[in-house]
Amino acid sequence: MSDKIGGWAGKVLRVNLTTNNIWYEPIDKYYDYIGGMGIGYKILWDNHKDNITAIDPDNIIVLSAGPLTGSGVICTGRTTITSRSPVIEKHLIADGHFGGHFSPAMKFAGFDAIAIEGKASSPVWLKIVDDKVTIEPADALWGKGIFDTHAMIAQMMGPNAQVAAIGQAGENLVPLSVIMTQGGHSAGGHGSVMGSKNCKGIGIIGTGSVKIVANNEKMRALDDHILGIIGANNNGVVPSTPQSWAEYSAPISRWKARPGLKWGAADQEIDLGEVPWNERNRIGFRTSMAESYIGVEYANKWMKRTGGCHSCPIRCFCELKVPELKSKYGRKTEHISNVCMGFLVPQYLMGTKNGSEAHAMAGALGAHILDDYGIWCNYGSISHLFKFLKTKDMFKHLLPEDEFNSIPWELWDNQDPAFLLDFYRRVAFKEGEISHLADGLYDVIKRWGLDGTNPALGYWDIHKESATKVFNKKTNAAVHHASETAGQVGTLINVVFNRDAQCHSHINIVNSGLPHDMTVAIAEKKWGEGAFDKVKWYTPINAAKVRFAKWSLVKNVLHDSLTLCNWMFPLLASPDKNRNYEGDSTIESQMFSLVTGIETTETELDFKAERVLHLHRALTILQMNESNMREEHDVLSDWVYDLDPDKNFGQEGTIKMDRADMQKALDMFYEAFGWDIQTGAPTRATLDKFGLGFVADRLAARGLLPS
Amino acid sequence: MITRRGMLKGSMGVAVGTVYSGTLVSFLTGCGSDSNSQEVVEVMPGGLMVVNPTVCVSCRRCEIACGWNHEGDSSPTLARVKVEKNMNYGPHGVQFDYETQRGECGDKTVVPSTCRHCEVCTEVCPQKAISTNEQTGAKVIDEELCVGCGYCADKCPQQVIKVVRSKMKAVKCDLCNGKPACAQVCPTGAIKFYNWEEAEAALEQYEKYTGLVS
C-alpha cells in the first residue's frame, strides 16, 4: 500500500436546508463501503428515522461518487443518488443513477458526496466552487424547465459548471420525477425529494484533481488492456451484421456500426463503415445505436454523433438533430440527447411501430418533453399502464367525464406525437386524475383499484397482467432484465431491490452476441455447469444459476459504489479471438488498486460490495419494520408464473417461472448470501462477518433479526 | 516532417519547406490576419494538435490522458487540451439562445481548445522561459526559468496555459515529446497531430465552429 491514498476526494459535504448549516465529514469513515451507493446507504442507515416519507424534511438525499469517479479510468463518470423513494410503498430506500460529467466535477471540487437534508423556506440552489459552498436563492429558477435551469445556473457560475437540477415535475412533487444533469443524463425517482426541500439544483465548478497513485505508464497499460476487451454498449463483443474482420455477428449486439449506417445529421455526413474491434481510435463509432430506437431511416437522417459520460469511449448516447422538434412542435431546439428508455418510453406510450415516422418522432419529441419537465418513467411503467388502460378503454371508468372529454384522444388514436405535449403537461403539473399515473404504482393501484378490486374494470388485476410488466407483487417494481434474461438468474436479481433492478451484469454476458455455446462455456467456467440455459428454454434452478445471480448483484453494487458503468461492466466476454473471446473480471480490482494505491484483489473488492448489499437489505427491513422478506418483499406477480397457459415451465418457448422452483431458488439464494432461509433476512453471523455488527444490534433491538 | 517556427517575425525569411502567410497566422494565433498580412511563416519539422469538432464526442479522454501523463493525476484544470470549458455551451459561454449555439446544451458540437504552438507565449515571457523544441516544434516551458508570473497564460490566444499554484509554474502542451497522449486515446480520432502542410485545412475546419451561430 502506498503512503498516500488516491481516488477519494477526501470529504462528504453535508447540507441542512432548514438550518442553512453546512459541514463536512471525512471520507475515511466510508472506505469500507467503497463510495457511491455505499456512502449513500451508510448515511441513510446512520440517520434512519421511522415512518418518515420521502418528501419529509428529515429524509436525506445523497448524490455520491466513488474512488474511481473522475479518475479518468474508463466508464467512471457515473453518479449514484440514494434516498427514500416516493414511488414505493412505505417510501423505502432506492438508488438512481445518472452519467454525464457531474460527479467528476464534484470530485474535482473536493467532495465524494453531497448529502442534503431539511427544507429551505423558499426555493434555493446549491452553489459549489471548490471549497466555497453557498445556498443561493432560486426564485428566478423556480418554474423553469431543466434545460433553462442548467443554462441559468451555468450563466451565474460560469459555462464550465456542471449542474444537476429538477424540472417542474420535481417542483410539483410528482413522484415519478428525475434529477438531470447536462447532456440528457437523468436519475429516476428522486426529483420530488429535491423539490420537497425547495432545492432546484446543484451547480459545481471543480478546479482540483483526482489523485492517482499509479504512474502514467501503468494507467495507460490498464487503459489499453480494457480497450482490447471492451465491446459496444451492454458489452456486445461482435458486430450486429457480418463484417470482414469478424468471425461472428449477432443482431442482438449493440455494435451497430456498419457500411450504410450514418451520422447523417453531422455537418459532414459520416458513413460509419466497418469498425473493427482493434481500431482503438474508432471505438466511439461502434455503438451508434439510434436505429434501435428510431429505425434506420431516421437514424441515418437525424443522428449527429454519439455521446455519453466522462471517460467513456463507448458513447451509448444518441445526439439527434430533428428539425421538426422546433418547426412543427414548437420546442426551442432541434436537438435532443438520450438513450434507451428516454426514447423508448414515449414510444411505448404511443404504441408506435419501429420504422415509422410517428415512432421516430415520438421518441425524439417525447424524450425532449420528459427531460425538460423532469418526468420519470419508472422504467416504462407509466407507459405500459397508460397504453393498457387506453387500449382496453378503461380511462372512461377512471377519469371524471369532463376531464376524459378534454383529453385529445384522437391524437393518440392517429399516432400523432403531439399527444405527448398534452399528456406530459398534465403529468408535470398534476392536472387532473390522469396525472396519478405518475404516482408510485402502489398508490395508483390502490387509488384506481387495479389489484382486482374495481368492478368497473372487470376486476382486472395488474399483477396478473404481463403487458403492464409489474414484476414484483410487493414493491410493484417493473421488469428490468428479469425472467426473460437467463430465467431464474434474472428473476432472482429482480427480487432484491425496492425499485426495478438496474442490474446489467447478467445482460452484459447474455447479450454479448457470441454464439450460445460460447456464452455457455464462459458462464460454466465462471459459475459451474447449468449456469446459463438456452433462450426461453429453462431448466430447474441449480447452484450455478444462484452463483450467477449473486455474482451479478455483487458486481452491480460494486459498480454503483466505485462508480463504474454497469451498462458496460463486468466484461466477461471480449471481441478478441486471441483470448478465445473471454474477458477479464479482475479489471475493477485492477482499476481500484492503481487509482487508490490500495492493492486489492477481485475477491476482496467484491467482499466490500457485498457488505453494501447486506446493508441495503437490512435498511429495507428496518424501514419496512418487517423481517419476513420472503413473504413481504421477494414476491413475484402472478403473471410471471401463469404466462403462456398452454405451456409448462421448462418447455421451449416460454419464460414462465414455476412457483415451487422459485421458492427453492430463494432457499438457495438466501443461503448463498448468508440470509435466513425462512425469511430472507440477514443473520447476525453474516452481518458480523461483513463488519456490520452494529446493524445486527439495531435489528435485534427491534426484533427484526432472525433467531 | 515539416514544422513552423519564427512566425510573427515580420519579414523573416524562409529556410525550408512551405511558406504560409496571413491565413495560417490568424488560424494559429486566433488573431485576425488582416492587420499584419505581410507576416510569413517558416516551416520546420513538427506540427500541432487540432480537433475536428464534428467528430468530438465529449468523452474528455484527451483531457484525462494529458493529466495522467503530465501531472500523474486526473485534472481538467491542468490538462493542456481543454474540453470542459467549451463543452456544454460552446466557445462563447452561455448565450440567451444557448439551444442553437455550440456545445452539449446547444447543437451538440463540442469545440475543445488546443495549443497552436504560436509564439505569443514565447514573446511575452519576461523570463525567456519558453522556447521551441527543435525535435517536435513544440513551445516548451523551462521550469528552471519559469517563475509562474502568468503572463503567458493571460495572453495565450487559446487559453490553454495554466499556472499551477502549488509549484508556481506555468504548464502547457509540449506535444508529449512527439507522442501526443491525447490523440492516442481519442475514441473517434477527433484530435490529431497535423504537420504544418496539413494544418491549414484542419484549422480552417476547426475555425468554422469557434464563432457564434447566427
Image: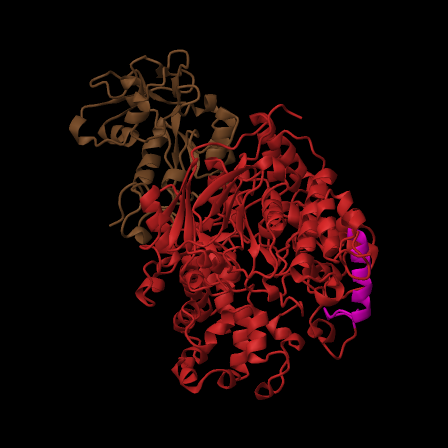
Chain colours: A red, B brown
Residue B111, picture quadrant: top left
Residue sitting at 60 percent across and 73 percent down?
A468
**Left or right of residue A652, residue A409 in this image:** left
**Left or right of residue A650, residue A1 in this image:** left
Residue B207, picture quadrant: top left
| In this view, A556 is above or below A664 | above
Tell which of A593 and A363 is nearer to you: A593
Horizontal and vertical percent position of residue A540: 82, 64
Tell which of B42 and B27 is nearer to you: B27
Q: Which residues are magenta?
A: A649-673
Residue sitting at 67 percent across and 57 percent down?
A622
Q: Quadrant of the N terminus of chain B?
A: top left
| In this view, A389 is above or below A35 | below
Kindly report the secondary structure that dominates the magenta region of the rendered protein: helix
Tell which of A87 and A701 is nearer to you: A701
Residue sitting at 53 percent across and 35 percent down?
A9
Horizontal and vertical percent position of residue A114: 50, 45
> Is residue A273 something that shows in the picture?
yes
